């Protein structure tokens, strides 16, 4: 007999702009109505920025993505399902701190180029 997961699935989105060569740090909190964060993935507005860009992330003061992790490992493209690309985690939400350090070391962008990064947190609300 299969056990059904009746929890409600939600997304929380963190969006920021990055310029070539920039290190961007985001500090915020998860939504209070979310109980758990179950996964994480990213989308870049300019896929040319993928090679060389790295990420480090913490949820609830626990490092979940170590320093110098290639963004390409977490990037979601249109031909992939969210469950296939999401980095699995299981951390408390409920207004927990989230910290992201994103470093652009891309070699494929012009000096003045900038792009948007969206970090998606897969959240669950317990019924």
Image: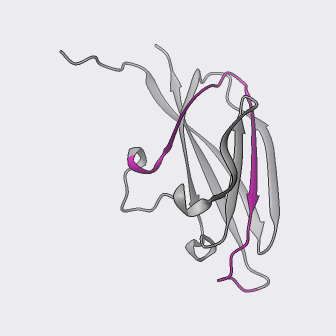
Residue 115, percent across and down? 69, 69
In the current view of this chain or complex, which residue is farthest to the bottom?
A: 110
Residue 67, percent across and down? 72, 52
Residue at left 48%, top 46%?
86
Residue 84, percent across and down? 39, 48
Quadrant containing the N terminus in the rendered view: top left
* Side (left or right) of 15 relative to 9: right
Residue at left 42%, top 48%?
82
Above or below — where is 4 with respect to 91? Answer: above
* Side (left or right) of 46 relative to 2: right
Q: In which quarter of the image is residue 43?
A: bottom right
* Side (left or right) of 64 relative to 123: right
Q: In which quarter of the image is residue 121?
A: top right
Residue at left 27%, top 16%?
3
Q: Give the range drawn in magenta.
A: 84-110
The residue nearer to you, when weighing 56 against 81, is 56
Above or below — where is 23 with respect to 41? Answer: below
The residue nearer to you, when weighing 21 against 13, is 21
* Side (left or right) of 26 relative to 123: right
Q: In which quarter of the image is residue 123?
A: top right
Above or below — where is 11 with respect to 105? Answer: above
The verdict on residue 126 being magenta is no
Residue 15, percent across and down? 69, 52
Above or below — where is 2 with respect to 9? Answer: above
Q: Which colour scheme is used?
A: one colour
Residue at left 37%, top 57%?
80
The residue nearer to you, when weighing 20 against 89, is 89
The verdict on residue 93 being magenta is yes
């Amino acid at each position: 007999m299969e056990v059904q997961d009746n929890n409600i699935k939600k997304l929380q989105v963190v969006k920021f702009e990055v310029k070539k060569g920039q290190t961007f740090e985001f500090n915020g909190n998860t939504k209070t109505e979310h109980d758990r964060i179950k996964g994480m993935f990213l989308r870049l507005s300019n896929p040319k920025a993928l090679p060389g860009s790295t990420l480090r992330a913490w949820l609830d003061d626990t490092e979940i993505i170590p320093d110098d992790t290639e963004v390409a490992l977490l990037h979601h493209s249109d031909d992939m399902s969210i469950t296939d690309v999401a980095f699995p985690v299981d951390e408390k939400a409920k207004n927990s701190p989230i910290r992201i350090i994103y470093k652009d070391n891309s070699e494929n962008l012009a000096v003045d180029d900038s792009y948007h990064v969206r970090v998606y947190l897969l959240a669950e609300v317990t019924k």
